[in-house]
Image (tube, rainbow, N blue to C red):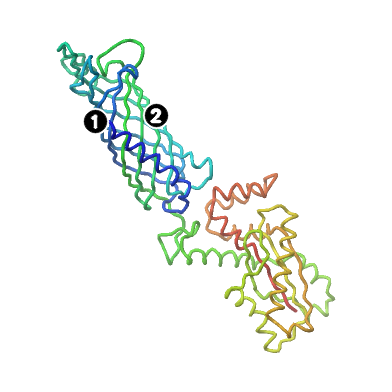
Amino acid sequence: MKKITIKSLLVIALAIIPMTFFAQEEQTPTNHWYIGIEGGATQFFGDNTAFKMDQTSWDAGLFFGYNFKNTIYLYANLGYVDLKGENKGFFKVNKLNLIQGNINLGYDVLQLFKLNPHRLLGIVPHVGYGMMMHRSEIEFNDGTVVKNGYSDSNNGPGFGGRRAVFQIPVGINFVFNFTKHFQANIDVVATKTDTEGMDCVRRGKHTDWFSYANLGLAYKFGIRDAKKCPECPEVEPATPDCEACKDAIREAVEEALKNYQPAAVEAEEEEVEEVEAAAVVWEDKDIHLQFKVGKAEVAKTQANDEEAKKVTDDVNAGREISVIRTVGYASPEGNEEQNMKLSEDRAKATSAFLQEKLGDKKEGIDFETEGMGSDWDGFYAALENSNISNKAEIANTIKNSENPTATLNQMKAQYPELSELLNALRRTQVFVK
């Protein structure tokens, strides 16, 4: 095996880096155990860089660990490493191998740029600590053969007289979660050892070390799934990948929003005389036109046309309606002043949309509009009726924050499912009497 093997794996690993910034779709759950195998090319170094060998060899191993939200990796590694090489003019390696075991901790650095626990690809620097048992046979140019780590020569406490020393592996792992239960990786590692005896050359200045570049495959298990959608049981509603799941969340949000009435409407009802209130009351037409982030335009879609029919059908059927009142809302992600203006614009846009649909039959009907600003009440109601884990903790954290809006935006990164709730809050409601 030529020395270019490690270089080739490094080139492949570096080529993966740009792809990681575009891998944003969910393919794997967050917390899980995993177990895998790996193997690849090795390179041996002696006391210092002048002793770099000119050959590569091979290694193979097993690893087992736990992944915290696809961000923190804690795992154990057990492997066999074979090393070869020749320092021309000095010595050559006849045999050099070791058995190693270590504990490692890694962190996906891409989460520092944009937190997303459902990323397909990751870049995970890691560091570890462990022990290895090695043996070697070195032949010098004068024909002298020196052994280390054999039962009959410089033996140690390990298997077959192997020498046992500590090691510190440091590396970077390129991870690809290509299915729910399988993960591939390219792991490039340099290991510093606590011995000068691997190459049987003791100069007292530097300890020996080696490196390897491995390809690996892991199986993920012990997955803690959220409550399943009955129409697609392999998908979590908290991070929906299908329309059925999105519809389920949307319906839960809308049901929660029906449980409260705008304070402005209730106040106006209290001002109506008792006799008149018994005869004329506001009727919620259950129209919920939704808007894009920061936008107030009503999209000309079939869905919005169907919503408008809840009013226009009554008018066309001859029902007498004196007032159509439109109330606008904004999701609480922006500042209060901007959200108040945005909610007012949405109410006006919805009113204009209904007038356009009514045509000449709008004559004699008073149209009122009002903006309610940030819909915090709707958010907490929707959160309470959702399937999001830790929803009580999320609500308390935001309510007790000095800046609830900033806290909400931070928690959206940790809980992407909050975005689906917020989508339903960018809306208007229509009342008639």
Q: Which of the labelled discs sits on residue 77, or is there none?
A: none
176 sits to left or right of 265: left
Amino acid on which the number 1 mark rests in the picture: Ser
Residue 409 vs 284, above or below: the answer is: above
361 sits to left or right of 38: right
Where disc 1 sits, the SS reads strand
Category of crowding for the residue at label 2, using alpha-carbon neighbours closer than 10 angstroms: few (below 14), some (14–19), many (at least 20): some
Query: Which is more toward the observer, 227 or 36?
Result: 36
What residue occupies the far bottom of the structure in this picture? Answer: 318
Q: Which residue is drawn at 54% across and 63% down?
A: 249
x and y percentages locating residue 291 in the rendered image? 63, 65
Q: How far apart are marks 1 and 2 (CA)?
A: 19 Å
Q: Residue at x 35, y 47 (%)?
A: 183
x and y percentages locating residue 392 in the rendered image? 59, 52
Quadrant (top left/top right/bottom left/bottom right) for the N terminus: top left
Q: Residue at x 46, y 54 (%)?
A: 25
Where disc 2 sits, the SS reads strand
Residue 83 vs 366, above or below: the answer is: above
x and y percentages locating residue 204 in the rendered image? 34, 10
Q: Mark 1 points at which residue?
A: 57
Q: Which of the labelled discs sits on residue 170, or is there none?
A: 2
Amino acid on which the number 2 mark rests in the picture: Val
Query: Which is more toward the observer, 117 or 157?
Result: 117
Query: Which is more toward the observer, 241 or 200?
Result: 200
Q: For the residues carrying marks 1 and 2, which lies nearer the camera in this image?
A: 1
Residue 371 vs 366, above or below: the answer is: above
| Quarter of the image where one finds residue 345 | bottom right
x and y percentages locating residue 64 in the rendered image? 34, 39
